[in-house]
């Protein structure tokens, strides 16, 4: 009887444990056979009872391990650091159109020009300092100078120019733009068209500075 009590206790413990185990996602069932012999002894087994024994069956869930999804393999291969593609290079900005600082041959006054090789021109000798007095005074002011007299007192002159650096060019353009704006603010509307035209030209040149 002690053996029978121990077996029953074991069965109840197993049943209690199986009842509290969460049902697996996919579970199989196991048949338990309760065999009662002629002498009244009870045996629990997994196979049918022997001939002559009373048999009862019970379906129990199999508490074997339930297959779970395989874990995602960890890629331990060292990864090369990805370098982002270089940003497209900006097209180089074009320098402003070349400008030249020139010296007027007749009076040595400086001026700025977009032409570094100005055309030569004829100027009276009196304007160059070669002849210190005007033509009329050479003749006492009594005779009006004629074409021959004027031709004999003219000489061919040419201004000299030096190229400006882009920085100097931009500075000069800004100064000229400021001066043009001052004139616009002080000029009647009817006189503004040439100043407005010059303003547009200067703005276009300053886009390259």
Image: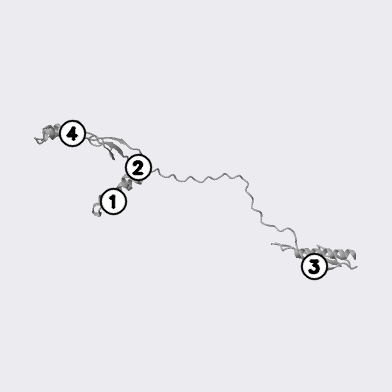
Disc 3 crowd, CA 10 A, few/some/many (<14, 14-19, 20+): some
Q: Give whichever of discs 1 and 2 has the lower sequence position.
A: 2
Measure the C-alpha gap from mark 3 to mark 1: 113 Å
Measure the C-alpha gap from mark 4 to mark 1: 37 Å
Element type at mark 2 = helix
Q: Please give the residue where the numbered disc 1 appears in the rendered image.
A: 184
Q: Please give the residue where the numbered disc 2 appears in the rendered image.
A: 171
Measure the C-alpha gap from mark 3 to mark 4: 141 Å
Q: Nearer the viewer, mark 3 or mark 2?
A: 2
Locate residue 60, reporting x and y percent. Answer: 77, 65
Horizontal arrangement in the rendering, residue 138 relative to residue 185 (left or right):
left
Measure the C-alpha gap from mark 1 to mark 2: 20 Å
Q: Give whichever of discs 3 and 4 has the lower sequence position.
A: 3
Q: Please give the residue where the numbered disc 4 appears in the rendered image.
A: 126
Element type at mark 3 = strand
Element type at mark 4 = helix
Measure the C-alpha gap from mark 2 to mark 4: 36 Å
Q: Quadrant of residue 121?
A: top left
Q: Nearer the viewer, residue 54 or 75?
A: 75
Locate residue 99, reporting x and y percent. Answer: 31, 39
Q: Nearer the viewer, mark 3 or mark 1?
A: 1
Q: Please give the residue where the numbered disc 3 appears in the rendered image.
A: 57
């Amino acid at each position: 009887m002690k053996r029978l009590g121990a077996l029953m206790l074991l069965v109840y413990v197993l049943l209690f444990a199986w009842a509290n185990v969460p049902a697996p996602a996919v579970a199989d069932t196991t048949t338990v056979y309760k065999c009662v012999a002629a002498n009244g002894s009870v045996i629990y087994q997994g196979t049918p009872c022997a001939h002559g024994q009373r048999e009862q069956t019970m379906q129990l869930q199999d508490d074997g391990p339930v297959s779970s999804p395989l874990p995602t393999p960890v890629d331990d291969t060292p990864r090369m650091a990805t370098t982002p593609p270089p940003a497209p290079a900006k097209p180089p900005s074009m320098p402003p159109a070349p400008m030249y600082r020139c010296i007027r041959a007749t009076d040595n006054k400086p001026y700025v020009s977009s032409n570094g090789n100005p055309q030569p021109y004829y100027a009276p000798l009196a304007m160059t300092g070669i002849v210190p007095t005007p033509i009329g005074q050479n003749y006492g002011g009594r005779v009006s100078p004629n074409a021959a007299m004027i031709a004999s007192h003219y000489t061919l002159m040419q201004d000299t120019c030096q190229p400006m650096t882009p920085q100097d060019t931009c500075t000069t353009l800004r100064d000229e733009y400021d001066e043009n704006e001052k004139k616009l603010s002080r000029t009647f509307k009817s006189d503004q068209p040439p100043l407005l035209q010059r303003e547009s030209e200067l703005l276009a040149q300053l886009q390259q500075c």
